[in-house]
Image: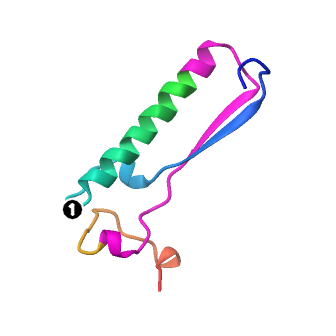
Amino acid sequence: MLAKNHGHIVSINSLLGMMGIAGATDYCASKFGALGLHEALSLEVSRASRNGVFLTTVHPFQVDTDMFTGVATRLVRPPMYAVT
């Protein structure tokens, strides 16, 4: 991508990569790592003056699955995003 100055990298992350919550330490750490990778790569692309290479990171809220049973965040899920 850098050689051709063309491309787009999309990282799927999580809001939990921006904060820590009890009961999901490993998940938060891995998502924080993904965010750090994205930020560092963005800086490298910028410093290489490659304006045709784009980076996007997506941070959805936690999905209501068994993985998060008993885990509560300080954020309140808006009703329109409630999983039923």
84 or 76: which is nearer to us?
A: 84
Q: Is residue 42 left or right of residue 51?
A: left
Residue under the image location 68 percent in, 14 percent down:
49
26 or 63: which is nearer to us?
A: 26
Q: Is residue 30 left or right of residue 60?
A: left
For disc 1, the marked residue is 23
Residue under the image location 48 percent in, 26 percent down:
40
Question: Where does the magenta region start and end?
Answer: 44-68
User: Residue most toward the bottom?
Assistant: 84
Residue under the image location 42 percent in, 54 percent down:
15
Residue 52, given in percent of the width and then of the height, sits at: 76, 26
User: Residue most toward the left?
Assistant: 22
Queried whether the magenta region covers residue 51, the answer comes back as: yes
Residue 84, given in percent of the width and then of the height, sits at: 47, 86
Residue 26, given in percent of the width and then of the height, sits at: 28, 52
Quadrant assignment, res 43: top right
Quarter of the image with the N terminus in it: top right
Q: Is residue 60 left or right of residue 26?
A: right
Queried whether the magenta region covers residue 47, the answer comes back as: yes
Q: Is residue 78 above or below residue 11?
A: below
Secondary structure at numbered mark 1 = loop
